[in-house]
Image: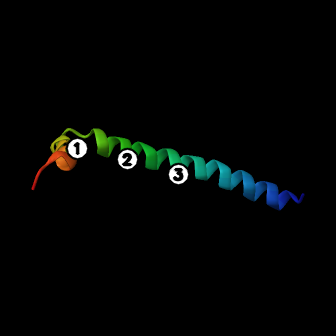
């Protein structure tokens, strides 16, 4: 394989992993943020409501 392909593949793997980890951390922070607790608690009770 050409060295250009290997260089591009390495770049994509490294930055793709960093991108994935950063998005995962942002979602985790959003989900665990104390202000979001009431919204998630309300959403968890939604299927049990009899409207």
In terms of sequence position, does the residue under pointer 1 or pointer 2 come before the other?
2
| Pick the front one: 31 or 10 | 31
Q: Quadrant of the C terminus?
A: bottom left
**Residue 9 drawn at (x, y percent):** 74, 55
Residue drawn 30% across the image and 43% down it: 31
Q: Residues within 10 Å of mark 3 (few under 14, many from 20)?
A: few
> For mark 3, what is the residue?
19
Callout 3 touching callout 1 (CB < 8 Å): no
Q: Is residue 8 left or right of residue 16?
A: right
* Residue 10 percent location from the top left of the image: 72, 51
Q: Quadrant of the N terminus?
A: bottom right
Q: Dot 1, how many residues are within 10 Å of its Cα: few (below 14), some (14-19), or many (20+)?
A: few
Q: Residue at x 59, y 52 (%)?
A: 16
Q: Nearer the viewer, mark 3 or mark 1?
A: 1
Dot 2 corresponds to which residue?
Answer: 27
Separation of residues labelled 2 and 3 (CA atoms): 12 Å
The colour style of the image is rainbow
Considering every residue shown, the one lying at the far front of the view is 50
Asked if 24 appears above or below 5 in the picture, the reply is: above
Give the vertical position of 41 relative to 8 (above or below). Answer: above
Residue annotated with mark 1: 44
**Alpha carbon distance from label 3 to label 1:** 29 Å
Give 31 or 44, whichever is nearer the viewer: 44
Which mark is in front, 2 or 3? 2
Quick check: 37 left or right of 9?
left
- Among the two numbered marks 2 and 3 on one chain, the one whose residue lies closer to the N terminus: 3
Kind of element beneath mark 2: helix
Q: How many marks?
A: 3
The structure residue drawn at horizontal position 74% and vertical position 59%, both measured from the top left corner, is: 8
**Mark 1: secondary structure:** helix
Residue 26 rendering spot, x and y as whole percentages: 38, 47
């Amino acid at each position: 394989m050409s060295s250009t392909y290997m260089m591009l593949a390495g770049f994509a793997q490294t930055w793709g992993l960093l991108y994935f980890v950063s998005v995962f951390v942002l979602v985790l922070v959003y989900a665990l943020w104390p202000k979001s607790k009431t919204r998630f608690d309300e959403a968890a009770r939604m299927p049990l409501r009899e409207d």
